[in-house]
Image (cartoon, rainbow, N blue to C red):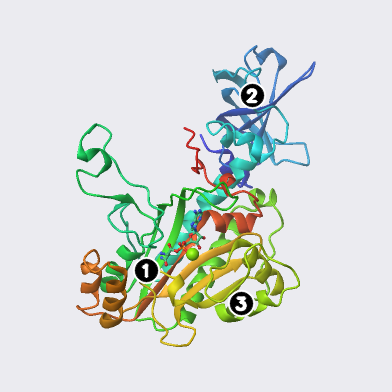
Amino acid sequence: KKSISKQHSCQKITNLVFFYLQGWVRSVRSQKEVLFLHINDGSSLESLQVVADPSLEKRDLTFGSAVEVQGKLVKSPHRMQNMELQAETIRVVGPCDIWSFPLKMKERHPLEYVRQFPHLRCRNNTLGALLRIRSEATAATHSFFQNNGYVHIHTPIITSNDCEGAGELFQIAVSWAKDSAEETHFFNVPAFLTVSGQLHLEVMAGAFTHVFTFGPTFRAENSQSRRHLAEFYMVEAELSFTESLQDIMQVMEDLFKTVTSTVLSKCPRDVELFHKYIAPAQKVIISYSEAVEILKQAPQTFTFKPEWGCDLQTEHEKYLVKHCGEVPVFVINYPYDLKPFYMRDNEDGPQHTVAAVDLLVPGVGELCGGSLREERLPFLESRLQRLGLTDAYQWYLDLRKFGSVPHGGFGMGFERYLQYILGVDNIKDVIPFPRFSHSCLL
Ligand code: 4AD
Ligand code: MG
């Protein structure tokens, strides 16, 4: 008993092999002399062709049904496939009511259509390919960091901090504690779903030097946009003994290149279903101040007028990427007042900046966000004091008292990464179960 993909890659099978196949019927074609089936078990895009005597056909052997077929695996006479299965027995394990089944045989359903059926859309070819690619990219991400000496840290989902300080938090409530103070709290203590594992990674970088995490993060963003989710996966790295943004950008680039080349080599058939990915020939690095000048001189008008000190909007990111030749663009050194408390003060002026970096990519916009962290106690103390956060972040200040080192890191939105390399328009189609404002199906 082997999965279809393993058999397909096994070139040595030339003689008869007894085979036991389990999967779902992708097509049924009944002829006078012969019955053809295509069975898919999800291990690859390929379906295995089953050739059977018409006497084995049953009423409930339809598109979508789950079957078990036993027979002999033989070299196929057809050019398009290596092998086919000559069935001896066919058992319908679970029939499928084709009239109410929303997927139809041999139809190319648009992604927006299958999104309505979160419990069934993984049986669609495109979604199937996407989720296998996602699985390979996940494994490749872990391998990249493990092979480069990073320690993997499980950062918590439930936390008391708002790392980004943007107030986009989901608060935890105890469901059974009706009409009590506990109802809106985590056992009487305010707690939230994490927006980023960064601060916990900073703790660990103070002991393990290089660390990473890769898990779900949550943002209460009331957005239906094609690049925002309320629950998304973030790949985050933190590096101690790092004094330059260049080092952080290098890790972003190496991560991107390694994971992408692994995906391209491990799932070529799945990747073929999407747009042809062309590795960018170069990258561009500009400062935030340069970016604002480019935007001010743009021949087009923007809904949000570009001004030094204002955040870059989607329309601005899009224009910058286009202006730089549709290649990845690193934007560095953002205004001090625009960014969270943890970013390192560049001590410049009169336009005061922090050592922040965002990576913008064609078609998606912001893919990664990172920075050097403020490791100097007096700087951090005065910033937290001005924000009224000193009490909440005593533990974070402690890290600067007990063996503080220059450090930095970044986070990459995993769904945006998949969107970019595969050219998928909507972020809801690159995650198994999308959660976004006003939608939590299943
Ligand atoms: O830029 P962000 O907010 O950075 C942080 O959270 C840092 N604490 C990360 C770090 O330095 N360790 O988020 C990082 C990335 C963004 O660049 C974007 O790709 C993705 O996470 N992201 C989202 N993806 C989908 N839906 C959303 N609502 C997202 N918000 C951010
Ligand atoms: Mg950001």
Question: Label 2's element?
Answer: strand
Residue at position x 76%, y 41% from top? Answer: 80
Q: Is mark 3 within 8 Å of ligand 2?
A: no
Pinpoint residue 211: horizontal percent, then vertical percent.
35, 67
Residue at position x 59%, y 41% from top? Answer: 128
Q: Amino acid at mark 2?
A: Ala
Question: Label 3's element?
Answer: helix
Badge 3 density bin: few <14, some 14–19, many ≥20, Cα 10 Å: many
Residue 143, above or below 85: below
Q: Which mark is residue 87?
A: 2
Q: From the viewer's perspective, is the residue at label 3 or at label 2 nearer?
A: 3
Residue for badge 3 = 291
Residue at position x 58%, y 38% from top? Answer: 4
Going by the image, does 322 lie left or right of 119? right
Q: Amino acid at mark 1?
A: Tyr
Tag 2 or tag 3, which sits nearer the N-term? 2
Quarter of the rendering containing residue 160? bottom left
325 and 306: which is toward the camera: 306
Residue 247, above or below 105: below
Q: Which mark is residue 150?
A: 1
Residue 413, above or below 242: above
Q: Badges 1 and 2: C-beta atoms under 8 Å apart?
A: no
Q: From the viewer's perspective, is the residue at label 1 or at label 3 nearer?
A: 3
Q: CA distance from mark 1 to mark 3?
A: 33 Å
Q: Is residue 160 visible?
A: yes
71 and 250: which is toward the camera: 250
Going by the image, does 187 lie left or right of 120? left
